[in-house]
Every structure is written in structure tokens, then in C-alpha cells.
Image (cartoon, helix red, strand yellow):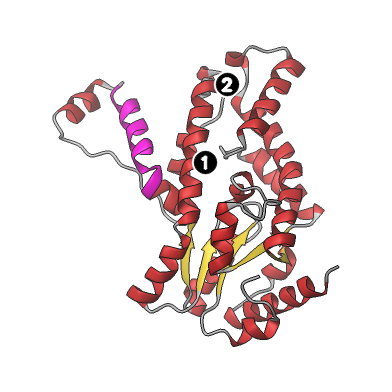
Amino acid sequence: MHYPTPEDWQRADEKRVALFGMSGLGKTHLSSLLRNKGGWFHYSVDYRIGTRYMGEHIADNFKSEAMKIPLLRDLLLTDSVKIESNITFGNLAPLSAYLGKPGDPEKGGLPFDEYIRRQEQHRDAEVAALMDTPAFIERARRLYGYPNFVCDTGGSICEVVEPGDDADPVLARLSESLLLVWIEGSQAHTDDLIRRFDRAPKPMYYRPEFIREVWQGYLAEHDLREDEVDPDAFVRQAYRKALEDRVPRYAAMARRWGVTVRAEDVGAVRNAEDFTALIADAIEAARAAP
């Protein structure tokens, strides 16, 4: 663990953490609070994915759709208009739109093979963005003078690492530079996440073996062809199954590589001092665990 004892953490002149857990449990909220009120550098993995590693794919997809409209086609072919995404820390909609959902094209669905191709692009991008973290720690210190650093990971980090492998390259690289912190939700949080997702189902990244199994099971259960699948109905089921699948992976990451904090305790953090105390308690709890 990067800070072996609570005292090491509290005395550290440079506090560096990576927050992980399901989207919607407070990673970005907490990161923004530390940035705005505590003077921490906020590194968003999803923002890095959408701008540095997936930006060209996203823009090309927009252009492909625009080329179907005669007026925009002519303007694009004469370099008269510029089409690009406007991803921010708080708005990752262009990235989600590119990932898409598989199913009926009349309902906005993608062919499953194309969906998997985009998922693979996201995996490569996420690994690269996570591996960039140490460079951004140095950049934040050298260019901007930030001693403290929070890495706001995507909810799918557990899908691109092997939590039980001591030699996992991503987790090994991260743990050399910062403390990994799992934000653990309760059953009530899980139920709330499902309700929110059901209201507005959105694309996500899943491990290929997981999503292929869920897809084949969905087709068989509902006796459907690929182009008959309602994309929203499918991703709602995939999301529920992903919540069950990810929790033990997050837990294994925390046991082997970091510490755990509860989502309700994260919700009570109001400033950097509260956060420092919360992490000190988590380190002590991890030291006391059998």
C-alpha cells in the first residue's frame, strides 16, 4: 500500500489517490470537491479516454452521420464546417454515444460485431489512460505546482485489470504512485443506481467475455434475432448483471491493492480535511483486517 499507516498518509506532503467503484457513487463529485475546495489536481480517466484516445473515433462517427445529409456532406467535402465533440469532466455524452448499444437499427442499435469493435477500442483507450496516471502526477507537480492528486477512474476499471494478479501491469503501475480507494455502495445504493439507469439507460464498457455471454443469453431467452433486440431493454439487463459481476472484482482490488470507504461516508465529506480523515480511517481498517 502506498501509505502503509494512517500517520504516513496524514504526514505526507503529497497525497495521491485513485478512486474506483461504480459510476454514480461519488467519484467525480468527490474529485471535483477536492479540486475546487482543496487545491487538488483532478485527473479524469474518462475525459482522457474521450479526448486523447477516442476523440478521433468519436469525431469520425459524427462526420459519418453528417455525410448522410446532403447539405452537410457538401460542406464537409469542401472543409467548410468543422465537426468535433465537446467532452467535459461533467459531460461524457459524446463518448457514450460512440460506444452505443447493440440491437435493432431502427431503435438506434448497432450490429453486435460493430458494438464489440467499439468496446475493444474503449478497452485499449482505458488501459492507456490509466497507464498515463504517473505522467500526469509529475505534470501536475511540475507545471502547476499541485502536490495533491486525485485520479477519478471510470466504473469499468475492474473490467480491464485482473485484481487477483500481483503482476497486473495497470494495478502495479498505479499502486507505485498512489493509493487505490474503493467507494463501496450498499444495497440501497445499488437499488438506486438500477432505478436511475432504468430511467436513462446509457452505453458502458464491459469485458468481452461477459457481454458476449449476456448477449447470447438474452437472444436465447427472448427468442430474438440480433436485429430484433431492443437496445435499451438489453443494456438494462446487462447493467443489472454487471453490478453483480463487478462488486467482487472491486472488493478484490481493494483487498490486494488498496482500501475501502463507504459511499455514505463519502457523501459526508465537505472538504479536504474530511477526506484526509476518511482515508486515514480506511488505512487503519485495512491494517486491522485479517
The residue where tag 1 is placed is: 123
The extreme front residue here reads 167
* Residue at 70% in and 48% down: 193
> Depth check: 143 or 264 in front?
143
Tell me the element at label 2: loop
Provide residue 22's location: percent of width, then percent of height.
66, 52
**Quarter of the rendering containing residue 78:** top left
Provide residue 61's location: percent of width, then percent of height.
37, 31
Q: Main secondary structure of the magenta part?
A: helix
Tell me the element at label 1: helix
In the rendered image, the vertical position of residue 118 relative to residue 50, given as above or below = above
Instruction: Give the number of callouts.
Output: 2
Provide residue 140's location: percent of width, then percent of height.
40, 71
Q: Residues within 10 Å of mark 2 (few under 14, many from 20)?
A: many
> Range of the magenta residues?
52-67
Name the residue type under label 2: Gly
Label number found at residue 103: 2
Name the residue type under label 1: Arg
Q: Is residue 91 visible?
A: no
The quadrant of the image that shows the N terminus is: bottom right
* Residue at 73% in and 73% down: 282
Q: In the picture provided, is 10 more to the left or to the right than 111? A: right
The answer to if 54 sits in the magenta stretch is yes
In the rendered image, the vertical position of residue 150 relative to residue 46, given as above or below = below
The answer to if 214 sits in the magenta stretch is no
Mark 2 or mark 1: whose residue is earlier in sequence: 2
Q: Residues under labels 2 and 1: Cα distance?
A: 21 Å
Q: Residues within 10 Å of mark 1 (few under 14, many from 20)?
A: many
* Residue at 48% in and 72% down: 35
In the rendered image, the vertical position of residue 96 relative to residue 8, given as above or below = above
**Quarter of the rendering containing residue 24:** bottom right
